[in-house]
Amino acid sequence: MTPLLEVHDLKKHFPIHTGLLSRISGQVYAVDGVSFEIGRGETLGLVGESGCGKSTVGRTVLKLLEPTAGRIRVRGDDITHLGREAMLPYRRQMQMIYQDPYASLNPRMSAGEIVGEPLAIHRVGDAGERRERVAHLFERVGLQPEAMGRFPHEFSGGQRQRIGIARALALSPELIVGDEPVSALDVSIQAQIINLLIDLQDEFRLSYLFVAHDLAVVEHISHRVAVMYLGRIVEMTDKTSLFETPLHPYTEALLSAVPIPKARAKGRKRVILTGDVPSPINPPPGCHFHARCPYAMARCRVEVPALREVAPGHFASCHLHDTGLRFPLGQAVAA
């Protein structure tokens, strides 16, 4: 079966303009060759440190940013170079839930107008039908239809994010990109929103690209997880394999930093990374992670490791898998 979304060697570079004439003096390599696919009804979690390019991947996939290179396919159709008009049918099938529920809603529009705006833009139904659809969406995300006339400042943060979810659902999309949709919410509210997203996925067979930095949240909602570091995916597999047997040093370090109960921490190896994340303006040659990697070899400094299938369904980008030696990872997280 053709995946709903296919991304191949996606790149997004931002030019740096300097001087009075705004000459281009360099590039920010925000996304530097990312490939993945998402099936119907599947959630792919995309994790990594702040600034690694996660959100840029999500926005580029939706064509909110034009890709520098690579291919984006939706239901087998190449949308990479489609213009604004040609993208309209695909806009209905791909929506976004934003990180900040305070900044993503127009304060001058009522909640009902915000949720109904996509329906009006795409000329779906008449005014009465749109109002009925909005009322149904309010109920489905846990809001009272009577609140449709209220404005964003009259809602709590969790309620505002529910409005954002209702807006994303308005056109019955197949794919939703969640750009850290719960990171700005209280922990108790995060759980409610995550459970709502899971219920909606089961009901409407939605596919999610779920961008986050909280591994506990990703473990709860995702089917598969892709780990990003400095613009590249370094590991990708199902969530069970990732958390139990990480096959990349960066993933090992991320998982070792996740707080777990003391009773489960026996035998856990803590990995402390040295140095800072390199600048995406001037990333290091070879493996981007080599300067901070405790297992780095001379080869890592000059040769980019390919993302390849190391175990069935488990992809990793690390030269250690070519050495023929027993891979030293998988000890960081207690079972």
Image (cartoon, rainbow, N blue to C red):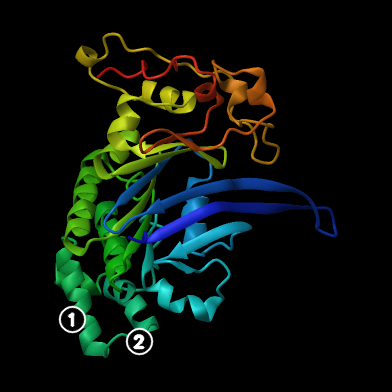
Whole-number angstrom distance, CA of label 1 to CA of label 2: 15 Å
Say which amino acid is labelled 1: Glu
Residue depicted at x 23% and y 45%: 189
Per the rendering, the mark at residue 123 is: 2
Say if 245 sits above or below 3 in the image.
above
Q: Earlier in the sequence, mark 1 or mark 2?
A: 2
Q: Would you say 266 lies left or right of 108 here?
A: left
Q: Is residue 143 visible?
A: no
Which residue extends farthest bottom? Answer: 126
Q: Would you say 59 lies left or right of 135 here?
A: right
The quarter of the picture where residue 135 lies is bottom left
Q: Nearer the viewer, residue 126 or 302?
A: 302
Q: Nearer the viewer, residue 233 or 77?
A: 77
Q: Which quarter shows the N terminus? A: bottom left
Q: Is residue 83 visible?
A: yes
Percent position of residue 319, x then y: 56, 25
Percent position of residue 239, x then y: 30, 36
Say if 228 sits above or below 44 in the image.
above
Say which amino acid is labelled 2: Arg
Residue depicted at x 58% and y 21%: 292
Residue depicted at x 51% and y 81%: 85
Question: Crowding near pointer 1: few (<14 within 10 Å), some, many (20+)?
Answer: few
The quarter of the picture where residue 326 lies is top left
| Number of the front mark, 1 or 2 | 2
Disc 1 marks which residue? 132
Question: Crowding near pointer 2: few (<14 within 10 Å), some, many (20+)?
Answer: few
Secondary structure at numbered mark 2: loop
Residue depicted at x 63% and y 31%: 278
Secondary structure at numbered mark 1: helix
